[in-house]
């Protein structure tokens, strides 16, 4: 099934033959559809930010809002996770935020050297990038951590003040944790229902192509990713209530559609997905005749998770890019005499994505969004300067706008993030808007340019190696599934566990190939072997479904 692998002597070119060109500006700035839960982080951040800020304003200490913002912004995270897993994830987010702020405040109290502060900020940004990518805690990923910790580095500080300031951040972090967990009181299975609905919608879109029409390959990849994400959500906690078991059966139906699109009623899948959006009961579906799909879940729950250190390994090139790019951007800003070099540092930190092509797109989006955001700040500044209440309300409104818009395109969210960041600097006292705006534009341009140059300079040659490793994983998973298929009486749960392992391997292969295709300075990608592995893998998935399928119901799906 495999084709000839690439020779280790293959010449390294500036761009591998399988690499994508840099996307045009029209595609980079194109608006997408809003997230189906855009309002959740948007409302959460308002509820998390507003009470602490109003309390500080009433006490006449709005200058301390930087510290409460550190805790409040933790409410942006983990909205996609089930509530049991969310409780743990949010606790780690708050602890991670406090750790970064603690390092920043202690450093700020020990040195006045701006160059040293920039270096510490760059190292913190690299650590935050690596850990958030390894734990997949985003969105919004490492940018919020980098913004808060780098800004804290440049706040005048003494060692005696650090405990109290950390206490404010911790108190706001506890409040953010409560805000993030509160919706579970009303809709305890909301995240699982949404993930299952996405899988059903994506599977229906693929089934509608019948597996042969134009665009079926992209639809199949999207459906496989959505199904895999749904299983990741359902397996994020070990508690398996009856509503969750019903959701698992629906995800199995999405898997059936993925592997056997011609035998699937795509309209029925969409109906089930629509029913999951509300608060009504989970649509009931009968198990497959083999009654094997939920036994496979037990097998997966028993498997150990990949150690964190192993997940960190492939991320070292990105960590090095982040550290180098952020440090150089901050130092360049200092050399130009800009008063807030951490803005350039954060701009560079925000750029680094999975590959060069994605980093280029983010750089363009960041520059466009920040420049437009500076103009918006110029329009809003007179209103915000009417008083502290107006300042707080404007800042909260931009918080909401940023989270509501950023899912459509990063640049659109940045239009709101920029004035919000400028307003936060005025919590300690009003400043002349012209100088503030000029500093922001210069830092944005410096951070984007220097950050992208660092990304090009620090090559990620491991990307091609990861494609080979992902191919090997797919082939092993396919062979395992084939052995289970060949067995006359496989062990309970073995077939479904093997099928999901193969699905996960195929999803990881596609993501790895996409990341490597946007990377420069590496070996040519083994495109023929990738195509062969994907085709044979999906054929094996279809065979596992046929093994489990029984008599058809009148609805067009397995009974």
Image (tube, rainbow, N blue to C red):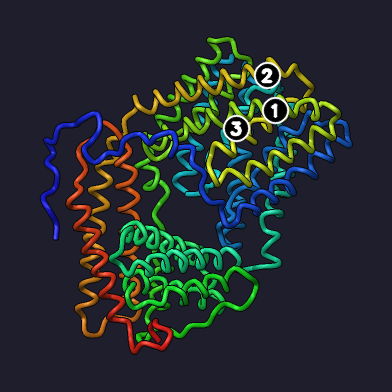
157 relative to 502, above or below: above
Q: Residue at x 50, y 26 (%)?
A: 122
State the image quarter where residue 289 is shown: bottom left
Residue 55: image location, x then y, percent: 84, 40
Q: Which residue is mark 2?
A: 436
Q: Which residue is mark 1?
A: 377
State the image quarter where residue 437 is shown: top right
Of the two numbered discs 1 and 3 on the same chain, state the one appearing first in sequence: 3
State the image quarter where residue 84 is shown: bottom right
**How far apart, in angstroms, are the residues tagged by discs 1 and 2?**
10 Å
Q: Quadrant of the N terminus?
A: bottom left
216 relative to 276, above or below: above
**How far apart, in angstroms, are the residues tagged by discs 2 and 3?**
17 Å
Nearest the eye: 214 or 421: 214
**How far apart, in angstroms, are the residues tagged by discs 1 and 3?**
19 Å
Crowd class of label 2 (few under 14; some 14 to 19; many from 20; radius 10 Å):
some
Do the numbered discs 1 and 2 sit on residues whose CB atoms are within 8 Å? Answer: yes
Crowd class of label 3 (few under 14; some 14 to 19; many from 20; radius 10 Å):
many
Q: Residue at x 81, y 29 (%)?
A: 383
Foreground tag (1 vs 3)? 1
Image-based side of 211 in relation to 43, left or right: left
Of the two numbered discs 1 and 2 on the same chain, state the one appearing first in sequence: 1
Q: Residue at x 25, y 32 (%)?
A: 15
Label 1 residue SS:
helix
Of the two numbered discs 2 and 3 on the same chain, state the one appearing first in sequence: 3
Label 3 residue SS:
helix
Image-based side of 224 in relation to 168, left or right: left
2 relative to 303, above or below: above
Image-based side of 301 in relation to 493, left or right: right
Number of the label disc, if any, that sits on residue 147: 3
């Amino acid at each position: 099934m495999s084709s000839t692998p690439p020779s280790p002597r293959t010449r390294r070119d500036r761009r591998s033959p399988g690499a994508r060109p840099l996307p045009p500006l029209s595609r980079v700035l194109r608006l997408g559809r809003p997230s189906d839960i855009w309002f959740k982080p948007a409302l959460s951040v308002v509820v998390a930010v507003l009470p602490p800020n109003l309390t500080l304003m009433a006490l006449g200490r709005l200058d301390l809002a930087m510290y409460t913002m550190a805790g409040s912004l933790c409410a942006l995270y983990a909205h996609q996770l089930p509530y049991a897993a969310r409780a743990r994830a949010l606790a780690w987010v708050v602890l991670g935020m406090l750790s970064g702020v603690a390092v920043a405040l202690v450093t700020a109290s020990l040195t006045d050297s701006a160059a040293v502060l920039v270096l510490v900020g760059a190292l913190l940004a690299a650590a935050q990038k690596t850990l958030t990518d390894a734990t997949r805690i985003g969105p919004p990923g490492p940018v919020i951590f980098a913004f808060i910790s780098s800004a804290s580095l440049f706040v005048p500080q003494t060692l005696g003040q650090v405990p109290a300031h950390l206490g404010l951040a911790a108190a706001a972090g506890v409040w953010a944790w409560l805000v993030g967990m509160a919706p579970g009181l009303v809709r305890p299975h909301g995240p699982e229902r949404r993930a299952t609905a996405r899988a059903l919608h994506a599977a229906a879109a693929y089934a509608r192509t019948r597996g042969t029409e134009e665009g079926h390959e992209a639809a199949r990849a999207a459906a496989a990713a959505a199904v895999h994400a749904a299983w990741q959500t359902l397996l994020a906690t070990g508690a398996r209530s009856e509503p969750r078991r019903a959701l698992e059966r629906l995800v199995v139906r999405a898997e059936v559609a993925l592997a056997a699109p011609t035998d699937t009623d795509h309209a029925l899948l969409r109906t089930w997905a629509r029913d999951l959006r509300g608060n009504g009961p989970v649509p009931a579906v009968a198990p497959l005749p083999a009654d094997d799909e939920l036994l496979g879940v037990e097998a997966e729950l028993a498997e150990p998770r990949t150690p964190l250190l192993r997940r960190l390994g492939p991320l070292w090139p990105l960590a090095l890019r982040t550290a180098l790019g952020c440090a150089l951007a901050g130092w360049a800003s200092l050399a130009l005499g800009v008063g807030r070099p951490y803005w350039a540092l954060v701009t560079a930190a925000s750029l680094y994505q999975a590959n060069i092509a994605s980093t280029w797109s983010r750089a363009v989006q960041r520059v466009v969004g920040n420049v437009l955001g500076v103009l918006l700040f110029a329009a809003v500044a007179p209103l915000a300067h009417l008083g502290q209440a107006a300042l707080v309300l404007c800042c909260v409104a931009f918080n909401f706008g940023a989270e509501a818009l950023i899912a459509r395109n990063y640049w659109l969210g940045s239009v709101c993030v920029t004035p919000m960041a400028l307003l936060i600097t005025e919590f300690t006292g009003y400043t002349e808007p012209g100088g503030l705006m000029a500093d922001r534009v210069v830092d944005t341009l410096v951070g984007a340019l220097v950050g992208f140059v660092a990304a090009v300079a620090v090559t990620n040659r491991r990307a091609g190696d990861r494609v080979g490793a992902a191919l090997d994983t797919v082939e092993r998973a396919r062979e395992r599934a084939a052995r289970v298929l060949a067995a006359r009486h496989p062990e309970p749960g073995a077939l479904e566990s093997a099928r999901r392992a193969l699905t996960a391997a195929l999803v990881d292969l596609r993501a790895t190939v996409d990341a490597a295709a946007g990377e420069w300075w590496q070996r040519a990608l083994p495109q023929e072997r990738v195509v062969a592995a994907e085709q044979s893998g999906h054929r094996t998935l279809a065979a596992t479904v046929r093994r489990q399928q029984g008599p058809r119901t009148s609805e067009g799906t397995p009974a």
